[in-house]
Amino acid sequence: MMIMILKICFLLLVINYGTCAKPNILLIIVDDLKPVLGCFGDINAYTPNIDRLADKSFVFKNVFAQQALCAPSRNSLLTSRRPDSLHLYDFDSYWRSTVGNFTTIPQYFKENGYHTYSIGKVFHPGKSSNFTDDYPFSWSKPTFHPKTEQFMNSPVCVDIDGSLVKNLICPVIVESQPGNTLPDIESLNEAVNFLEQRRNSTEPYFLAVGFHKPHVPFKFPNEYLEYHPIENVSLPTNIDRPSSLPLVAWNPWTDIRLRHDIQALNLSFPFGPMPGHMTRKIIQAYNAATTYVDDLIGKLLNHVDSNTIVVLTADHGWSRGEHGEFSKFSNYDEATKVPLIIHIPGLSTGEVISDALVELVDLFPTLVDLTQVAEALPLCPKHGNRLACTEGRSLAPYMAYKKWERWLV
Ligand SMILES: *[C@@H]1O[C@H](CO)[C@@H](O)[C@H](O)[C@H]1NC(C)=O
Ligand SMILES: *[C@@H]1O[C@H](CO)[C@@H](O)[C@H](O)[C@H]1NC(C)=O
Ligand SMILES: *[C@@H]1O[C@H](CO)[C@@H](O)[C@H](O)[C@H]1NC(C)=O
Ligand SMILES: *[C@@H]1O[C@H](CO)[C@@H](O)[C@H](O)[C@H]1NC(C)=O
Ligand SMILES: *[C@@H]1O[C@H](CO)[C@@H](O)[C@H](O)[C@H]1NC(C)=O
């Protein structure tokens, strides 16, 4: 009966917006997460919580980030404009002061009656979001960053001889870490507090939670290794650097070469290659870090009420040895492909899989359609300076089609 009411409510929303209470929105962005998840068919993944969310969601399996680098991808996703329009391919400019005062997804919802809040890494912090994560434009209150994020690159990994080093692969005992915690645990706690505080509010919220793992270094509570025995890790089949690859297309993974455990391997620059046993350990650690974040996501979802649209995605992927790469930065699928899971209350009652070609710029118009906070977001004109518009296309018709199908059954 409840589901029936929600469905009718949703139908009214679609036909004639403004009839029912607006749904809340929870946007989960996982840093550098490629779709190596159980629900995406990865047999080495252990992601029961994300899989459970997928069981009652629309799961898009052919989704691409606009660029395989954090700041340009996030700014693109959040403004629904391509890096070419934002003129941002790195970390060094803020669109509002360089190209145009473009409206972001959270800003749009804030201006349409939502309370908006950012926890962890949503915008890339720093110059590309004006050192404020675009507060106050995008957010109702200043954003939350975990205090222990300052130890991201500190020597906190225990080496074989017991010394503390900066390793790429860094399973830890949480209680022995600075502050006795880890950044994503802090973000989870903040998000749970937020959800509990909003529980009786009639004002809908837009909460964005950005988890830092499995971004390098692979620092995670060591118990998550248990789910990923090294003998079960297989190497990618396309492990060689293509011989005809132009040098300009090669990324020599300088960021991971700086880590002590990688330095110790004396790899040749710029091509490596990485020894197979280390590639296995890297994949294992990435999978364990993903299981850790999956666990936090499960805890977060326990506090989300039923009138909430949940979106889970990532800023881009990460090559784990494919084509000889250990990085994002490239245009290979391994670096550009991301998961996208959209749960719609009352509508997503089972898993619906789509192979449609989707881009992260599609998210903004999709959320506008799903919530009906206003009429459909227009396409950005070729010329002129429209502030709230999209360079993507809404995925709602696709989901609505599925909805009618189910509704008529
Ligand atoms: C960026 O932040 C600075 C300092 O907080 C502020 O003065 C400036 O107006 C902001 N830029 C824009 C375009 O809002
Ligand atoms: C940009 O847009 C915001 C929100 O509408 C507004 O408050 C701000 O004054 C604008 N900034 C400029 C430089 O026009
Ligand atoms: C929400 O309402 C319930 C039931 O009335 C109450 O017990 C609880 O304290 C309220 N929570 C908040 C955060 O106001
Ligand atoms: C590892 O692989 C073995 C053999 O395929 C399988 O039985 C076992 O369940 C796997 N372990 C994990 C934790 O996935
Ligand atoms: C790396 O080079 C150092 C210094 O030349 C040497 O002591 C060490 O054994 C080498 N390690 C490996 C794994 O080859």
Image (tube, rainbow, N blue to C red):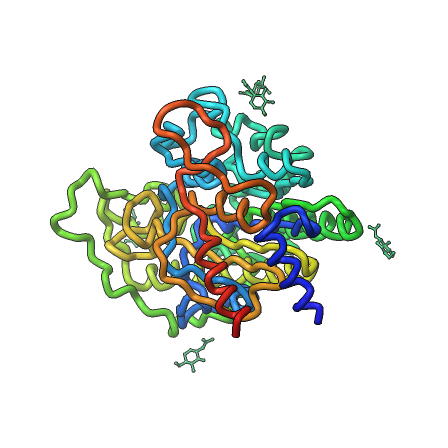
Residue 255: x percent and y percent? Answer: 37, 42
Is residue 394 toward the left or the right of residue 295 in the image? left
Work out whether 318 lies above or below 73. Answer: below
Residue 115: x percent and y percent? Answer: 69, 40
Residue appearing at x 45%, y 69% in the figure? 38
Residue at the left extreme of this rendering: 244
Residue 347 seen in this snapshot: yes
Residue appearing at x 30%, y 66% in the figure? 235
Figure quadrant of the N terminus? bottom right
Is residue 163 toward the left or the right of residue 281 in the image? right
Residue 177: x percent and y percent? Answer: 62, 50
Work out whether 231 lies above or below 17. Answer: below
Residue appearing at x 55%, y 46% in the figure? 210
Residue 167 seen in this snapshot: no
Q: Nearer the viewer, residue 135 or 225?
A: 135
Q: Nearer the viewer, residue 335 or 116?
A: 116
Residue 147: x percent and y percent? Answer: 64, 40
Work out whether 206 lies above or below 383. Answer: below
Work out whether 362 lies above or below 379. Answer: below
Using the rendered view, name the quadrant where residue 308 is placed. bottom right
Residue appearing at x 57%, y 49% in the figure? 27
